[in-house]
Amino acid sequence: MKYLVGFSRVFVGILFIISGFIKLNDPVGFSFKLEEYFSQGVLDLPFFEPHALTISIIVVVFEVLVGVMLLIGFRTKFTVWSLLLMIIGFTFLTFYSAYFNKVTDCGCFGDAIKLTPWESFTKDIVLLVLIIFLFIGRKYIAPAFSVRTNRLIVFFALVLSGFYVYHVLNHLPVIDFRPYEIGKNIEDGMNVPEGAPEAIFEYAWKFNVRGEEKVIVTNGDYPQVDGEFIDVKTTEIQEGYEPPVHDFTIEQDGEDFASTLLQEPKLVMVIAYDLRKTNESRYAEVKRTTDAAMKKGYKVIGMSASNNAQTVKLIQDNDLEFEFYFTDETTLKTIVRSNPGFLVLEKGTIKQKVHHNDLDELKFE
């Protein structure tokens, strides 16, 4: 039991620290994932949605701290109880997502490692077993250092986590795991490579044949049956390749201008996924920045999921000299963790990406 507890202590502690740090790097992204869980149709807890960012910060900081506390053997009873309660909660959420197919990615490792709902649930079951071993054998978890040293380690972990969160919230994630990182070409990210696996579907056709129901399973072709068609059930038995960039459009009046605009040699995108939540105090600086870009020969466009009335009002209120295009809100949230945020592109390749607090870092050549 002692060696099993020792292995579980190291494995669980390191995994919680890694998982927590990845989400600590992008708490805004994790808050979007929590909003999915809180939304109607999933957990139906909409009153938590406005507090998703605060909850995400508390959860990820605590995740890092309990991982550190487990490794150094600090406050063992509190640590193992916290781990047990957290993993029970995580296991419930991942099972719910997998069984009801409500949230297709748990966000356990942010955008760094994508897990299917059932993979996430399996991972949590393994962790639950290991944490139960820790709970039962907690007497074998000895402190690594003196009480004073352990307290200092936990305190510094808390302070560092706090400073790190503050930095990424007021700028951008230090490590960008998304397909829109600097240097990536958006059009290349939308391409499906030759020979990529295609989705395979199974169709269960139901017919009424002389008063009896008959089900015929095919891979797509409509079966020739002497009977009355009743229903068909479609099941995906193999997922096809999904390019890293999908659902990307730049629409105006129902027409997609993405292929044209992504060929622009000098393009600036002002991205504000929701104008009701955008930081309006920054638009005076946005105007100065975009005016300077246009003087240097850049084409400037806005991208938002908000309606036309909201974009027109923003343009008029801030005397902006560019038009807004419509893009899916989830896509805009993925592109940049800032509302508004800026991208500078050269023929579809992202050259610069900044938070609205860092507009002075943009360089227009």
Image (spheres, grey):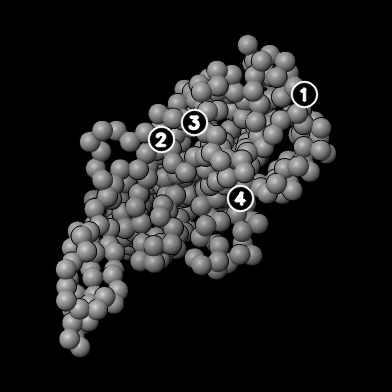
Q: Nearer the viewer, mark 4 or mark 1?
A: 1
Could you say which disc has been placed on residue 190 in the image? 2
Could you say which disc has been placed on residue 288 in the image? 1
**Vertical order, 157 against 135 (above or below):** above
Residue drawn at (83%, 39%), measured in percent from left and top? Answer: 317
Whole-percent x, y for residue 126 in the image = 29, 57
Q: Secondary structure at mark 4?
A: helix
User: As rendered, which of 332 and 77 lies closer to the eye?
Assistant: 332
Mark 4 / mark 3, whichever is N-terminal: 4
Q: Secondary structure at mark 1?
A: helix
Identify the amino acid type marked 1.
Arg
Whole-percent x, y for residue 137 in the image = 31, 60
Disc 3 residue crowd, few under 14, some 14–19, many 20+, Cα 10 Å: few
Residue drawn at (26%, 75%), measured in percent from left and top? Answer: 229
Q: CA distance from mark 3 to mark 1?
A: 28 Å
Q: Nearer the viewer, mark 3 or mark 1?
A: 3
**Which residue is under mark 4?**
53
Mark 2 / mark 3, whichever is N-terminal: 2
Please report contact status of discs 4 and 1: CB closer than 8 Å, yes or no: no
Left of 363 or right of it: where is 231? left
Identify the amino acid type marked 2.
Met
The quadrant in which residue 206 appears is: bottom left
Please report contact status of discs 4 and 3: CB closer than 8 Å, yes or no: no
Residue drawn at (61%, 50%), measured in percent from left and top? Answer: 53
Identify the amino acid type marked 3.
Ser
Mark 3 / mark 1, whichever is N-terminal: 3
Give the residue furthest to the front. 226
Whole-percent x, y for residue 248 in the image = 49, 40
Identify the amino acid type marked 4.
Leu
**Vertical order, 78 against 190 (above or below):** below
Residue drawn at (60%, 54%), measured in percent from left and top? Answer: 52
